[in-house]
Amino acid sequence: FKASQTCPTMGKYVQAQRKGKSPVFKAHVRTRKGAVKLRPIDYAEKHGYIRGVIKEIIHDPGRGAPVAKVQFLNAYRYKRDTELLIATEGMYTGQFIYCGKKATLDVGNVLPLRSVPEGTIV
């Protein structure tokens, strides 16, 4: 071997670095909870607010922050929509959170950036 090539018998493969390399070793995603997204913006969020209830706060493997399962009433059909949001510090199960333009500035609420007062600590 030349000095620039590595010898195949020396050294070890770091398992964490092999997760994205090939189909031989893949990341374990079976127990992951799902994609975390904000609600799709509708009329209620653009012009007012919509209320949701935090049903549970769960641990998502492969993610540093906990995930909150939030249930909203559907504005157009008689059903409930369940969304996964990143849990903020101070959230608890059973808490009401509000999403929309006219929601108050409180722990867990989702507001557009223009509605947040200047100098607010995020």
Image (spheres, rainbow, N blue to C red):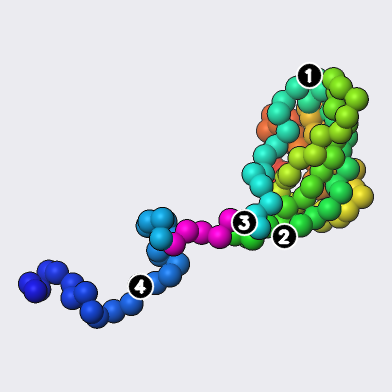
Instruction: Say whether disc 2 or disc 3 marks the residue closer to the N-terminus.
Output: 3
Q: Amino acid at mark 1?
A: Tyr
Which mark identifies residue 43? 1
Q: Is tag 1's residue or tag 2's residue first in the polypeptide sequence?
A: 1
Say whether residue 27 is magenta.
Answer: yes
User: Along the polypeptide, which appears first: circle 1 or circle 4?
Assistant: 4
CA gap, disc 1 to disc 4? 53 Å
- Looking at numbered disc 4 in the image, what kind of residue is underneath it? Tyr
Number of numbered discs visible in the structure rendering:
4
Disc 1, SS: helix
Q: Which residues are magenta?
A: 25-29
Cα distance between the residues tagged 2 and 4? 29 Å
Residue 59 marker: 2
**Front of the two marks 1 and 4:** 4
Could you tell me how far apart the alpha carbons at marks 3 and 4 are, in whole angstroms?
24 Å
Task: Name the N-terminal-most of marks 3 and 4.
Answer: 4
Q: Which residue is identified by label 4?
A: 13
